[in-house]
Image (spheres, grey):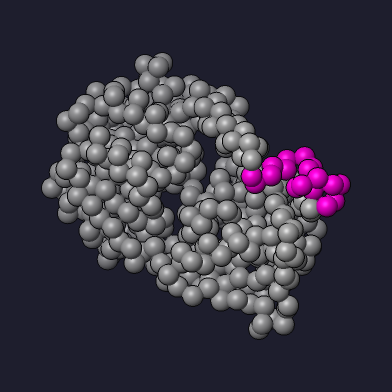
Amino acid sequence: MSAEILKALKEHKFDTPFPIQEAAIPIILKGRDVIGQAHTGTGKTAAFSLPILSKIKRNGPIQVLILVPTRELAVQVTNEINKFVRYTGIRTVSIYGGQNIGLQHDLLRRGVQIVVATPGRLIDHLKRGSIQLDEVKFVVLDEADRMLDMGFIEDIKFILFYVNEDRQTCLFSATMPPEILRLAQDYMKEPEEIRLNEELSLKTIDQSYLIVHEGEKFKHLCNFIKNRDKKQTIVFAATKQRTQRLANELRQEGFRAITIHGDLSQKQRDIAMYRFKKGNEDILVATDIAARGIDVPTVGHVINYDIPEDPLVYFHRIGRTARAGTTGKAISLVSQDRIDDFGRILRQTELPVHKLNEEMGIEAPILKQGIRRRYYGYQTSYAGKGGGTYGYRGYGYRPRFGRNVEQRDFNRNNRYRRERSGGPAQRY
């Protein structure tokens, strides 16, 4: 490493590398392509950026392209890299939807060496001719599985077409689905794999859960917040509407709460994150838009107010605490209709998750045979209420089975297509 980078590392008290850094940095310095499986919060930004920084020209053209799934992660990665390049003169810029594209164009014209971008907005710049990737020598695909989930796979292929094949490519992902491995096979040259499974066990997080009736969850949420230590808390909810309502109700109970979700403008989200990081608000109520884009070391607690259907989302949520070697707590409020979903999470975690019902003297509700309830954020649906096989179908309700699932997936994919084309859905 150069003396300037070492000075910045020392200034930020980065003395000992984390496992992913220790494994990846020597390989990247050798010029090899890398596939790294590492959980969020394990230091992978430094793992790929530090060796790349030592190999790029200062004051030159764009030489490094880092693709990320969300605007929050783009800002986070940029801020982290800026810590390392403070004394080098290397410039980094974030490119993402929701920010004025003219402003981004002005920043690019001043000259940058590293671009951290979401795929949709990067394609906008490529079509405008405001970004040239001819001189890019390093490409990083960060949170590749998340980009796959969001429908960005074709966008990634489109972008890589504009990058010289004589490049070094690094791919980092929390999971390795077959689609990711096929992408690596097509666009990487004999990559070396790094799979640090011990990092995925989240050993520094105390995980627990409480099974309660849906109507009692808010009461227990307030109790958990009152009994916590002074560290900040993130509360995850299923939808934007539910997130906003929870934040309002928490403020009515006297808590300092703020929210972040897809209906907020970029400016509103930036203000919310600024206030949370500064400690002006100590509770952040968020949708999963924040599950991979928040890096606040003072977060000591994550509370899952709603249980996600995908176990992977659970692990990314609780990864917002215990950042960079610290410890944290994760509590899940499991309503009776989400017991099956949480059971899948329990089967995948490597560490024990403590059930709090007995020690708190709370009897766990039992889901009656034949009743299927699905919560989608607007209301809970009960079989028999209003008649019909699936019961009352309120606004926003989608039955789990049948053609409606296909329609839901179709709508979801269209939303991602609109995002790539610069439509209103970019706020997700």
* Residue 361, image quadrant: bottom right
Percent position (x, y) of residue 297? 48, 61
Tell me the residue at 66%/83% (across/down).
Answer: 359
Q: Is residue 185 left or right of residue 405?
A: left
Q: Up-down: is 224 above or below 93?
A: below
How many numbered callouts? 0
Q: Is residue 185 visible?
A: yes
Q: Front-most of 98 and 386?
A: 386
Q: Is residue 281 visible?
A: no
Taking the magenta stretch, the answer to whether it contains residue 390 is: yes
Percent position (x, y) of residue 84? 31, 49
Taking the magenta stretch, the answer to whether it contains residue 189 is: no
- Residue most toward the left? 30
Residue bounds of the magenta highlight: 384-401
Tell me the residue at 39%/29% (across/down).
Answer: 154
Q: Front-most of 122 and 201?
A: 201
Dominant SS in magenta: loop
**Which quadrant is the C terminus positioned in?**
top right
Q: Is residue 332 left or right of residue 127?
A: right
Q: Is residue 197 left or right of residue 298?
A: left
Q: Is residue 295 left or right of residue 283?
A: left
Q: Front-most of 302 and 94?
A: 302
Tell me the residue at 23%/47% (across/down).
Answer: 34
Tell me the residue at 69%/44% (across/down).
Answer: 399
Q: Up-down: is 97 above or below 253?
A: above
* Residue 262, image quadrant: top right
Percent position (x, y) of residue 371? 74, 58
